[in-house]
Amino acid sequence: MEELGIKSTKASLATIGITKAKQINWNASTAELVELAIFNKEGSLTNTGALMVDTGKFTGRSPEDKFFVDDAKTHDTIWWGKVNHPISNEIFEKLHAKMIAFTEGKELYVRDVYACANPDFRLKVRVITSTAFTSLFANNMFIRPSKEELTIFEPEYTVLALPEFYADPKIDGTRSPNFAILNLTQKVIIIGGTGYTGEIKKGVFSVLNYILPQERHTLSMHSSANIGDHGDTAVFFGLSGTGKTTLSADPNRKLIGDDEHGWSDQGVFNFEGGCYAKAINLKQENEPEIWDAIKFGSLLENTRFFPNTREVNYADTSVTENTRVSYPINYIPNAVEPSVGGNPKNIFFLTCDAFGVLPPISKLSPSQAMFHFISGYTAKVAGTEMGITEPKMTFSACFGAPFMPLHPTKYAALLGDKMKKFNVNVWLVNTGWSGGPVGVGARLKLKYTRAMITAALEGKLDSVVYHPDPIFGVQIPGSCPNVPYEILDARNTWADKKAFEAKAQFLANAFTENFEQFADFASPDILAGAPKVNKKPVLA
């Protein structure tokens, strides 16, 4: 399977030291990869033709085991701390060498792909793996070059992902046997000890989040995006589990992408060529586009069959809450190709509020938009990361701190510039709870969230009467088509109004306490977007 690409031979891998692999499957077709995965006992076919696999011990990302090499390029540019962990080039070099040696006698799978749908920003990436299903994932998730492009493909970045290779923390200097290390100088990502495929896509995302804002004045966004019939682009920010994939897969709009995008002055473009959707409790009636995309070539992760069948039980959480499916974006019938759009007219900040006090939709002023973007509030959904078993309040800068190598101010400044330049509407959408916190209230119905977003997109909220939330200051619409008016103001959904006020004040204080870490750069405009609480952010 080395016929694609004149330069795609074993000699090509020799430049990075791989010379003794048993076999190299180079840019194998989807059918070949599925066949090999089954032959290697990596997975099973479902009744829809999709391949179902287990990713092993790790069914989510391991943020504490992701590192950047600290060197002359990154030392003064990366935002080091609890999110971005430094590691020495010496440790990287030794681990990289061990991984190269580990490939001796192994069967490898090489996939040459692009990141960034806009050709002006395109990044060439070579993904080398030791499992067929991981190569299938890379083929699904990134942009697939033509046969002609493969013949002259020269990678700018290389990803080496070997799930069976484990580090020895005492010897190798890692925190755990599993690791993901990005070397931005050598342009290499090494991943070991974990079969969770999301580490690959988020590794490449992190690279783009470093490059584009600094070198191309382009905002990199942990977001989904779609486009209407009249060319109106919408962007949806949010962490995993807040609804980015679900809400952007709108049958009445064309999908640009479901997770990672760039916003240049030319417009919005997808970083990827596929979708990586959560599969937990998936139902055809709720998410028909995703349901229909689960067919031959799609990759299901950590799901289970109904007994004695090949039918997937999407409600089964026996392995993890974070069951996933990856598929090429053209499996969504209304996906736009190439995956690009114009400058957005509407931006939605999606948050899963576990306390049930934020309104289901509200309009933000520029100051509030900057404050909430930097805050990035949500509740982490069970299963998204190792150790998360129930919703947990978190603040993730730019709605994607784990993937943002630069200081949040870099991204916030770009967002602010573009919001003003293109006069964008910004909405805060609560996809979490109403009527009380987790255990008391209920999660907002998807049909209502869809109706509110549709109303915003169609301009049907432009002329309604708004009133400000007395604590958070956001503007709450008094009515919305196809949504009961009583749920628009979260206060109305609580039986105990005093309990609501106390919980709202508690969350507002959490916002301001979290924001103190950014006080050294916060302008008066940004601080003006903060909630009204007794304790205010303290400037350094």
Image: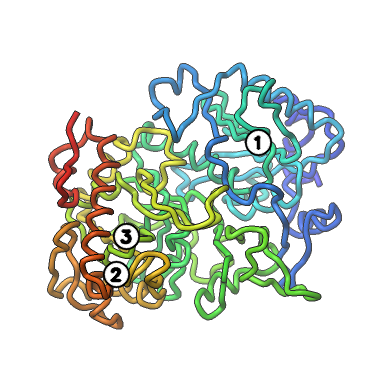
Image spot of residue 370 (x, y percent) = 24, 47
Q: From the viewer's perspective, tell me whether residue 233 is left or right of residue 498.
A: right
Q: From the viewer's perspective, tell me whether residue 532 is left or right of residue 331.
A: left
Determine the secondary structure under disc 1: loop
Which of these two is toward me, 366 or 138?
A: 366
Reading the image, the residue beneath label 1 is 178
Image spot of residue 281 (x, y percent) = 57, 71
Residue 171 seen: yes
* Rendered image quadrant of residue 152: top right
Judge depth for marks 2 and 3 and give the one in front: 3
Tell me the kind of residue under disc 1.
Asn
Name the residue at 45% across, 35% down: 83
Crowd class of label 2 (few under 14; some 14 to 19; many from 20; radius 10 Å): many
Question: Counting residues from the N terminus, which is met first, the one under dot 3 or under dot 1?
Answer: 1
Tell me the kind of residue under disc 3.
Phe
Name the residue at 15% across, 75% down: 464
Circles 2 and 3: CB atoms closer than 8 Å: no
Image spot of residue 259 (x, y percent) = 47, 54
Reading the image, the residue beneath label 3 is 348
Judge depth for marks 3 and 1 and give the one in front: 1
Crowd class of label 3 (few under 14; some 14 to 19; many from 20; radius 10 Å): many
Name the residue at 26% across, 42% down: 513
Determine the secondary structure under disc 2: helix
Question: Counting residues from the N terminus, which is met first, the one under dot 2 or under dot 3?
Answer: 3
Residue 457: mark:
2
Which of these two is toward me, 351 or 386?
A: 386
Which of these two is toward me, 335 or 202?
A: 202
